Image (tube, grey):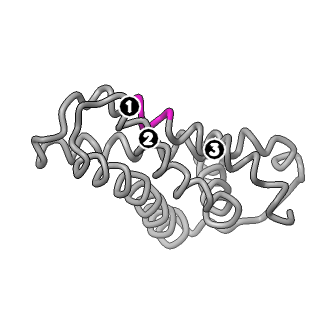
Amino acid sequence: MNTLIEIGSFFLSEWLWGITWGIYAIPIAMINMFILMRFYTRASFGTTLLVALSGPLIAFLVFNIVTLTVLIYGLGFEYAQTDQKSCEHIFLIYLWLGLIYGSLQSIYLKILSIYYPQISNVQRLYILSYIAHIIAAWMSYLLLPFCNL
């Protein structure tokens, strides 16, 4: 039971970071995904634009909805900061957030490829989505000093 509380607290902390300081990662991931898809896939401009704009946005929305409904309203989690040690490694917070968004975007890409047959080579898109979100996490981390933290 204690492990579930730790996991829930982790996702709640990531969600709070994602809607505050991590919000910059979503538009950066959209741009990264568009650039990566233009260079590494044979998709048309329309398909590239659809996937690059909708993927990170859907991942962000799904993460928000699941966190709000399951963790906060369903299980009654509340955020209570117990120590400052979690803020010592801000890049790891961004990295985990990027991996969460990349995982959710990969699920979205799999569902999208079923209903939209123009999307081919989904395995390559999985890798590109993780790369786009990790680069976005790194770029958001580098932009953090300019955000008056």
Name the side, left or right, on which 71 lies relative to 143.
left
Q: Residue at x 35, y 28 (%)?
A: 40
Provide the residue designation for mark 2: 35
Provide the residue designation for mark 1: 39
Q: How far from the left and from the top, in percent, is residue 104?
A: 40, 46
Compared to 76, does 42 lie above or below? above
The residue nearer to you, when weighing 87 against 51, is 51
Q: Amino acid at mark 1?
A: Phe
Contact (Cβ within 8 Å) of mark 2 with mark 1: yes
Q: How far from the left and from the top, in percent, is residue 124?
A: 32, 27
Q: Earlier in the sequence, mark 2 or mark 3?
A: 2
Numbered disc 3: secondary structure: helix
Q: Amino acid at mark 3?
A: Ala
Compared to 106, does 148 lie above or below? below
Distance between the alpha carbons at the discs numbered 3 and 1? 21 Å
Distance between the alpha carbons at the discs numbered 2 and 1? 6 Å
The residue nearer to you, when weighing 47 against 19, is 47
Numbered disc 2: secondary structure: helix
Does the magenta segment cover residue 128?
yes
Does the magenta segment cover residue 121?
no
Q: How far from the left and from the top, in percent, is residue 86?
A: 81, 47
The image quadrant that residue 136 belongs to is top right
Q: Can you tell which of label 3 and label 1 is closer to the viewer? A: 1
The magenta segment: 127-131
Distance between the alpha carbons at the discs numbered 2 and 3? 16 Å
Provide the residue designation for mark 3: 137
Name the side, left or right, on which 132 lies relative to 78.
left
The secondary structure that dominates the magenta segment is: helix
Q: Residue at x 45, y 69 (%)?
A: 69
